[in-house]
Image (cartoon, rainbow, N blue to C red):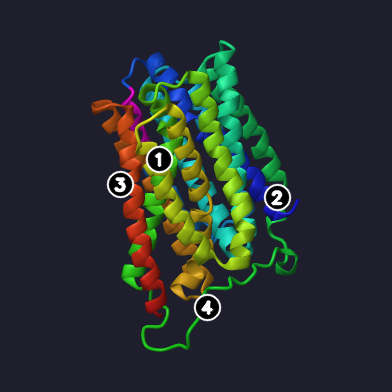
Amino acid sequence: MRPLRLAYLAYFTVALPGSTLGLLWPSIRLGFHEPIAALGILLVFGVTASVVAAVATGRILSWMRVGLLVALSTGLIALALTVEVLAPTIWVFAWGMVLFGVGFGALDSALNVHAASNFGARDINWMHASYGLGATIGPLVVTAILSGGLTWRWAYGIMAATQAVLTCFFLLARHSWERPPSLLPAPRPAVDEPPPERAPGPGHGKRPTGLVVSVLTFSAVETGIESGVGIWGYVFLTAGRGLPHDVAGVAVAAYWAMMFVGRAMLGPVAERVGPTRVLGAAVGGVALGAALMTMPGPGALGVIGMMILGLAAAPIFPLMTLTTAKRLRTTSVARTTQMVSLQVATSAIGAAALPAGMGLAIGVLDARILAPLLLALSLAMWGVYALLSRLTWRTGV
C-alpha cells in the first residue's frame, strides 16, 4: 500500500476516539462522580505526554523508520483505550489519557514530518481530511451507541479493538513507507511562495526567533480553537443554546464533516492559487464563524457558526506544516523535521490547554461563554497571522 494511503488510514482511525471525548465526557464524569470542569484537569496530563512525544519524535526518526513508529504509536493508542475501558477510578482513566497522549503525539508528529517532505498541498490536506472524516463518523457512532442504551465503556472498547487490529496491519505494512523517492507523490510548487533558499551568507541557516515564535504561537491558538469547538461544542449547543442531545450530537459530527470537506476541497485550491491566499481567507473565516456563534438568537445560529468555523479552520494547520521549509527558507531535512515536530508539540499544547481553560470558564460561568472565548482567540490568531506574514516576507536566512 502507498504511504499516502497508509497515512489516510492512520489519521482516520485515530480520529474516532480523538473526536468523541467531549461527547462521552458527560457520561464518563457521572460514572466517576466528577464535575464537568474536571476534563480540563485531565487534559493537562494528556497534553504533557503528547508534547513530550511530539518533540522526541524528531530525534526518534533519526534511528527508527517512520513505518515502525506509526505501528508502535497505534499500538500504544490501543493500550490507552483499553486502560480507559477498564478504569475503576478517574485516576486510572487519567493514566489512559497519558498513554493516549504519548501515542497520538508520536503518530501525529511522524505523519506530519513525512508529509512535509513527501506530499503536496492537496495530499497533505487530504491526509488531514481523513482525520476529519473519522471525526465525523466517531460522534455518529457514539451517539448511536449511547442511544442504544450502551455505556461509554462499550464505545471505547470498540475503538480499542479497532486500533489493535490496525496495529497488526501497520506492523505488516511498515516497509511500505520506505518507497524510493521516484515513487512518492511529488510536491507541486506553490505559486505565491518566495524562492526556497537564498545564497549562503553570514548567519545562513539560523532560524529567526520572531518568525519561529510566531509560527508556534499561531499553531497553538489555531488548534486550540479547533479542538475547543470539537470538545465543548456539544455542551455549548445543549446547555448553552438549548438544543436536544441527539441534535447536538449530529451537529458536532457535522462540524467535523465540515473539517473534512474543507480539507478535501481547499487542498487542490491551494495547489492552484497558492497556500498564502487560502490561509489568509481561512483565518478570516474562523473569526466570522466565531462571531456568528456569539450572536444571540436561535440555536441554529450557533450551529451555522460552528459549520463556518470548521470549514475555515480545516486547511490551516496542514498548509502551515507544508510551508514550514519555505517559510524558514531552508532545504535542510533535519531543520524541517525539528520545526515540524515543534509545531505539532505546540499545537498539542494549544489543543489541550485552551480547551482546558474553556472548560474551567464553562464550569465557573455557563456554556454560553464558549462563543465569546472563541471569538477573542480567533481575533488574536488573526493578529498573529498578520505579524507572521510580514516576518515571512521580510526575514531571510
Pointer 1 or 4: first along the chain: 4
The answer to whether residue 22 of the structure is visible from this angle is: yes
Q: Is residue 5 left or right of residue 369?
A: right
- Nearest-to-viewer mark from 1 and 2: 1
Pointer 4 or 3: first along the chain: 4
Magenta span includes 42? yes
Residue 288 percent location from the top left of the image: 41, 47
- Nearest-to-viewer mark from 2 and 3: 3
Q: Residue at x 39, y 43 (%)?
A: 290
The numbered disc on residue 196 is: 4
Pointer 2 or 4: first along the chain: 2
Mark 3–mark 1 distance (CA, rounded to whole Å): 13 Å
In the image, 23 versus 301, the foreground residue is 301
Helix, strand or loop status at disc 2:
helix
Mark 4–mark 3 distance (CA, rounded to whole Å): 34 Å
The numbered disc on residue 292 is: 1
Helix, strand or loop status at disc 4:
loop
Helix, strand or loop status at disc 3:
helix
Pointer 1 or 2: first along the chain: 2
Judge whether 388 appears above or below 167 on screen.
Answer: below
Q: Residue at x 49, y 49 (%)?
A: 312
The numbered disc on residue 376 is: 3
- Residue farthest left in this picture: 364
In the image, 271 versus 45, the foreground residue is 271
State the residue position of label 2: 5
Write down the region rendered in magenta.
36-46
Q: What amino acid is at disc 3?
A: Ala
Total marks shown come to: 4
Q: What amino acid is at disc 4?
A: Pro
Mark 2–mark 3 distance (CA, rounded to whole Å): 37 Å
